[in-house]
Amino acid sequence: MKHAASVSHEDATIQEFKDNPQEAAAYLSAVLEDGDQKEVMLALRRIAAAFGGVPKLAEQTALNANTLYRTLSARGNPEMKSLMAILKALGFRLAIEPIKAAHV
């Protein structure tokens, strides 16, 4: 009897994003809504891994790969220009929607 190979949660998540870009978009949207900057950078790094990795992302964005690794780290703080280039290369765009005001 063969046993299925064990896959880490991280690897399974990245594979899911490869197979289902809509899931990646929903994940990133949820993190942007509820997460802090560290979580957003981690989410972008996971999605980048699913879509070819940082070296491929560097080619697509014309950004330096070493800079991208730092940008997508937990302490990363991308400029808006870099963030927009990263999102575009990943096939996403930033959208804004109003926050529902609390009833007073």
Image (cartoon, helix red, strand yellow):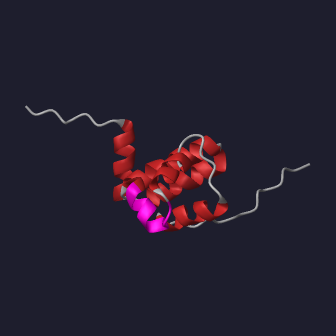
Question: In the image, is 101 to the left or to the right of 38?
Answer: right
The reply to whether the magenta stretch includes residue 57 is yes
The residue lying at 58 percent from left, 48 percent from top is: 40
- Left or right: 46 in relation to 12: right
Residue found at x 66% / y 61%: 80
In the image: residue 34, left or right of residue 41? right
Residue at horizontal 45%, vertical 60%? 58
What is the quadrant of residue 59 in the picture? bottom left
Q: Is residue 90 magenta?
A: no
Q: In this picture, which residue range is highlighted in magenta? A: 55-63
Marker count (numbered): 0
* Nearest the eye: 57 or 49: 57
The residue sitting at the left extreme is 1
**Residue displayed at 39% across by 51% down:** 49
Q: Is residue 79 visible?
A: yes
| Viewer-proximal residue among 32 and 26 | 32
State the image coordinates of residue 41 (x, y, percent, origin top left): 56, 47
Quarter of the picture holding the N terminus: top left
Q: Position of residue 65 (x, y in %)?
A: 45, 55
Measured along the vertical axis of the image, is residue 80 above or below residue 9? below
x, y (%) of residue 97?
A: 71, 63
**Can the viewer see residue 17?**
no
Q: Nearer the viewer, residue 65 or 28?
A: 65
Q: Position of residue 79 (x, y in %)?
A: 65, 58
Q: Residue furthest right?
A: 104
Check the image and report above or below for 6 versus 86.
above
17 up-or-down from 60: above or below: above
Q: Main secondary structure of the magenta part?
A: helix
